Image (spheres, helix red, strand yellow):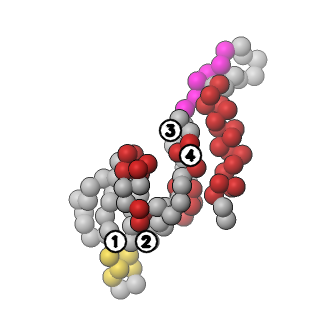
Amino acid sequence: MDVEAYLQDTISELQLVLDSGFTPPNDLESVPVHLSRIVCDKPARSFIKQIRRHSGYYGCDRCVVHGVRLERTMTFPQLHARLRTDADFRSRSNARHHIGVFPFERLP
């Protein structure tokens, strides 16, 4: 499934609301809007963010640890790995973590 096609309507509508704000019914004043969270389970998060699944070698979306396969299970033995920053994510500093482009990156 193509994440761009899947999220096209959502991104377009969200871009409009982010640009012009939201005006509640029966109100004259527009309310500014910003996106702070996207809530979904791990497989959906991997799909939407276009990153390796949580069971992949570079699957941790919180830090830059490299996974180790141990008896058919992916483990992340490094307990104090460097955290992944927004700048790391956007610059794709670890290309193996990404499988595509996160569609929400286009939004302000």
Given residues 24 and 10, the one toward you in this image is 10
Residue 58 is one of the magenta-drawn residues:
no
Indicate which label's residue lies in the foreground, 4 or 1.
Answer: 4
Instruction: Decide which of tag 4 and tag 2 comes sooner along the chain.
Output: 2
Instruction: Decide which of tag 3 and tag 1 comes sooner along the chain.
Output: 3
Indicate which label's residue lies in the foreground, 4 or 2.
Answer: 4
The image's mark for residue 67 is: 1
Disc 2 and disc 1 in contact, CB within 8 angstroms: yes
* Distance between the alpha carbons at the discs numbered 4 and 1: 26 Å
Q: Where is residue 55 in the image (x, y as percent from the top left)?
A: 44, 71
* Distance between the alpha carbons at the discs numbered 4 and 2: 22 Å
Q: What element carries label 2?
A: loop
> In the rendered view, does 29 fall on the left or right side of 76?
right
Instruction: Decide which of tag 3 and tag 4 comes sooner along the chain.
Output: 3
Q: Name the residue under label 3.
A: 36
Q: Mark 2 points at which residue?
A: 56
> In the rendered view, does 69 fall on the left or right side of 105?
left
Q: What element carries label 3?
A: loop
Indicate which label's residue lies in the foreground, 3 or 4.
Answer: 4
Note whether 6 is above or below 55 in the view shown.
above
Instruction: Decide which of tag 4 and tag 1 comes sooner along the chain.
Output: 1
Disc 4 and disc 1 in contact, CB within 8 angstroms: no
The image's mark for residue 104 is: 4
Q: Which residue lies furthest to the top in this view?
A: 28
Disc 3 and disc 1 in contact, CB within 8 angstroms: no
Query: How many residues crowd mark 4 within 10 Å: few (<14), some (14–19), many (20+)?
Result: some
